[in-house]
Amino acid sequence: MAAESAQTLERGLRLLRLLADGHGGRTPTELATSLELSRPVVYRLVTTLMNEGFARRDADGRVHLGFGVLVLAQAVQPLLRAAALPTLRRLAEEVGATAHLTVAEGDDGLAVAVVEPSWTDLHVAYREGSRHPLAKGAAGKAILAMRGGHTGYQVSEGQLQEGAKGVAAPVTGLPWLEASVGVVTFGGLAEGAGPRVVAAAGELATALA
């Protein structure tokens, strides 16, 4: 019985991940095909998730994520911030630039943690909770690049703030998280900023694994 319950839970989590992949709603038949499960099993999973608010069906019968996942997402953000702060603090001090963790929310990037360097005379003020399109700025570009299979760092200049330069790298190896670690500064970036950002993203991925 315990094994059966664990299998049901695993299937339900796989279904949620599928619904969260950004490709819109799916019919139960499409879900069954993608998950390699029978339609009756998928119907039972969808019904259970709908009862708990984690899934919903539109007028055409397509299944989408339910708004109940927002409660979970709001609870996760403080945990992400707490886990990221030590890495971001080291990165900001070493590079001399404002360090940040950005997560994808739809077509936007959301800054969930920001650390400013303590020893510089001038640095970029970047608010936690700031949003910007993923297509603009190094942080969003790194997330989009990861979706395309590229895990190196991305750079940008003046796309979000005039005169600001940024470099960011994706946090890889975590199927449940689309995020990047980056730094932004006025003037030139410190030598080795790109590889250091990649290393920081790796450190955070290890901490969250």
Image (cartoon, rainbow, N blue to C red):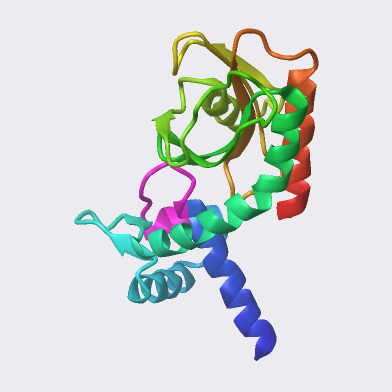
The residue lying toward the viewer, choosing from 149 and 34, is 149
Above or below for 144 versus 63: above
Relative placement, left or right, of 74 versus 14 is left
Q: Is residue 4 magenta?
A: no
Q: Is residue 171 left or right of residue 13?
A: right
Dominant SS type (magenta): loop
Identified at 74% across, 23% down, the residue is 95
Across and down, in percent, residue 189 comes to: 68, 13
Residue 172, percent from left and from top: 70, 40
Question: In the rendering, at what x and y percent does residue 184 appear?
Answer: 59, 22
Q: Is residue 12 above or below residue 3?
A: above
Residue 153, above or below 201:
above
Which quadrant of the structure image shows residue 185?
Answer: top right
- Vertical arrangement, residue 208 with respect to residue 54, above or below: above
**Number of callouts:** 0
Residue at x 58%, y 18% (from the top left corner): 122
Furthest residue to the bottom?
A: 1
- Classify residue 191 as left or right of residue 88: right
In the rendered image, the quadrant that contains the C terminus is bottom right
- In the image as oriented, which residue stretches furthest toward the left? 59
Magenta stretch: give its range.
19-31
Q: Say whether residue 8 is visible.
A: yes
Whether residue 25 is in magenta: the answer is yes
User: Can see residue 172?
Assistant: no
- Quarter holding the N terminus? bottom right
Please tell me in which quadrant of the rendered image residue 161 appears.
top left
User: Looking at the picture, how far across and down is residue 25, in whole percent?
Assistant: 35, 49
Residue in front for this viewpoint, 45 or 133: 133
Query: In this image, 61 relative to 113: left or right?
Result: left
Q: Residue at point 38% right, 57% down? A: 65
